[in-house]
Amino acid sequence: MVLGSLCLWCGPRARAQQADIPAEFQNPFNTVTVFADSQHEAKNILTLTGHVEIHSREAVLFADEAVYDQSAGDVDATGHVSFGDPKAYLEAGHAIYNVKSEVGIFTTVHGYLHPAPRAHATIPMSGAFFIRAREVDRVGEDTYTVIDGRVSSCENERMGWWLAVQNARITVGDKAVSHGDVFHFLGVPMFYAPVLVHSTAQEPRQTGFLLPNIGNSSQKGRIIGDAFYWAINPSADLTLGVEDYSSRGLATIGRFRATPSATSEFAVNYLQVDDHGTGPLRAERAPGESIRAIGDDQDLGFGFRGVIDVDYINSLAFRLTWSNNFNEAVSSEARQTGFASRNFDGYSVNIYAHRYEDFLSSEEVPNNAVIIRETPSLDFAGVDHELGQSPFYLDFDASAVGIGREEPGFSTPTLTERLDFHPEITLRAPEFWGFHFTPTVGVEATRYGTSYFGPHDPLTRLLGEASFDLRPPSFERIFDRRIRHYRLKNVIEPDIRYNLVRAADPEQITDIVRFDETDVLAETNEIEYSLKTTLYGRSDATYAPTDGATPAQTDGSQARELMSLSVTQKYYFDPSFGGVLQPGTNNVFAPTLDLTGFAFAQGRRLSPLVTILKVAPFSNFDTELRADISPSGGGVLNVGVTSSVHRGDFIFEATDFFVDREQGLSLLMPVVPILPTSTSSNLVNARLIYGHAESRGLSGAIGMNYNITAGLANALVGQLTYNFSCFGVDVGYNRFNLGPLRNENQFRIAISLSNVGSFGSLKERDRLFQTTGF
């Protein structure tokens, strides 16, 4: 065995005699040391017999017999020859090696080379490239040529894979180039390639064609594709490829990545599909394109940081049809954002551009989306600035924005101005009998270049606001009785907040075009009250040792939250919010949004009762339940439950979300109509994971999105992985049921080769181990 032989050259050997080394070789850079059972010297020629060892720099050569020319540095070795250095180990029947140039020829060879540990490996790394060949030439410190041989990352290639090559040139830590290649998997020849190029670096970067992708889909047909990878320079690369869907057409795929500096990185992914939709799919064509770009630069200059985040699609139908991620496929929103920001001494400066698009349906018709543009924009803000030596603190936010909005039946100019200034002064009063009282007063002045009604004239909105936060003393109790070695503590925390907002001209509120959260402010006179009770546990109770010989001890662990329950509600002294609340319409205003994301019946003084229950009795289990309860006895408006369980190699995560639309909810759902209209909705999202995809052995994951109301699984995703010592096999299944545009079964498979890469249709970005969105 190769690994068994490795110990021979690593361990001590018999050293009966040591040859005298000529003076010219006695230097710290190239000292040659020779050991053998017997030796004979004639005219600087050493004949060595029995347990021969020749040490040169970091290399060592073993043999049964050798002839060493001390003048030329040539060694001719036979019989159980082995050669090793920190980057390679070879066993051969015969070797000719020069200790000066460190080059040599080895025949009838097997051994291995040490590649650099691969970053972000998808399967366990074998840590070696195993070689079996008629001849291997060492042509440099890191470079070897293989003639008429096999290359593999499997120690026993017959139980894995190997590449039969006519000749190959391998540079450790750089690349391997082979010619006349036949790829074998489990002993079966799979394909022939006249030339293959593979990176042996830690971060693989080698220009060339990638391994092909294959797969099958009930809606897209047979899938086959390939891509070309271009390592442009050490800090940038480009991947261009095509995929052919036999039932739909060609897809063009592109990916550009760059790291211009140590503090910056940038990546762009592009997908374009020419969808011809043959047969019954002709009516469901969804051609188009998508762009996903993310960039970050921590040092743009002058202390600024820059970020770009672009998510672009040309239609909702394209996203529904071609996205492999369920949560992405059903999202109707696309955002493109870029900003440069700087923070200093409690101030921040932000220069940004933003575009938001919300598709109202999957039909490709004009004016089928709500589009909001904010560009160019400038924001300057300051927080927590003490006014002199007083207890008063100043916060402010000032912005100047070029803004525009268009939607079916309405549009503003492409860009119009919005100027906003919002200062606030807060009094941080000292604690009084355990009470904390924090009042705040402020004003917000906003200038709009357009308005909603009539001739769309400019208008100015002026709001004054006053609020206070009153936090009474908390109530605490430590229980004497311990449960399961836990020492328990209960804390009850009440909180009261009052908020008053008044407008100089209340009628202007309904005439304001809503672009973002700045524009949904309205008059309000409200009080919010909440109560939270928390049970903490700490397993530091004293205990007596079993032998009774030493004093009691504690483990000093930190207290953690075992359970908490919070209840919050608002009372509106003005339930119409200055008259802007209009029955029968979609009312979106800050006084309701800052408590719950759901609208509720118009004209009520009491908001829904918002309850949040968190339970975490064990370190590997936690559950959170959030419910909005109708204040008029109408029951539950919506419930969300999120649970997570970790036990050994198993991870289970689930979310259940229920909405009752009969309780006065007025929701606009801009999604493709999939199911008949229902008075309620109940969706379950669950995921079960076993093992780790990068570990040896079996691992798997399954995810499901199930509509309980309709009795329909919108998405079902499964993946099974088995990693052997030098290769792994991934099998995946995707089921999408998203209406007429997508009712699809996908079957995907990938084979990953240690130290090489993977090929197949199951890409890393689609693996359940990497994403919760399945």
Image (tube, rainbow, N blue to C red):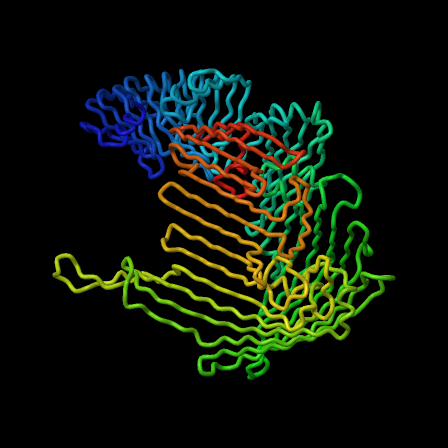
Q: For the view shown, which residue lies furthest in the right direction?
A: 455
**Quarter residue 312 falls in:** top right
**Residue reaching furthest front?**
633
Where is residue 122 shown, x and y percent of the image? 46, 35
Instruction: Identify which residue, 239 or 70, lies in the foreground.
Output: 239
Name the quadrant of the N terminus: top left
Position of residue 506 measured from the top left corner of the image (x, y, whole percent): 76, 71
Q: Against 602, is 91 above or below?
A: above
Is residue 699 visible to us here? Answer: yes
The count of marks equals: 0
Residue 383: x and y in percent read 59, 71
- Whether residue 72 is visible here, answered yes or no, is no
Q: Residue at the spot x=46%, y=39% of the render?
A: 119
Q: Return the residue nearer the eye: 642 or 392.
A: 642
On the image, which quarter does residue 135 sit in?
A: top left
Point 50% across, 75% down: residue: 471
Task: Quadrant for the C terminus, please.
Answer: top right
Q: Residue at x 42, y 19 (%)?
A: 186
61 displayed left or right of 731: left
At horizontal 43% and vertical 70% (from top left) the residue drawn is: 492
The one nearer the camera, 628 or 558, is 628
As rendered, which of 435 and 482 lies closer to the eye? 482
Q: Position of residue 274 (x, y in %)?
A: 71, 30
In this rendering, the answer to whether 162 lies above or below 679 is above
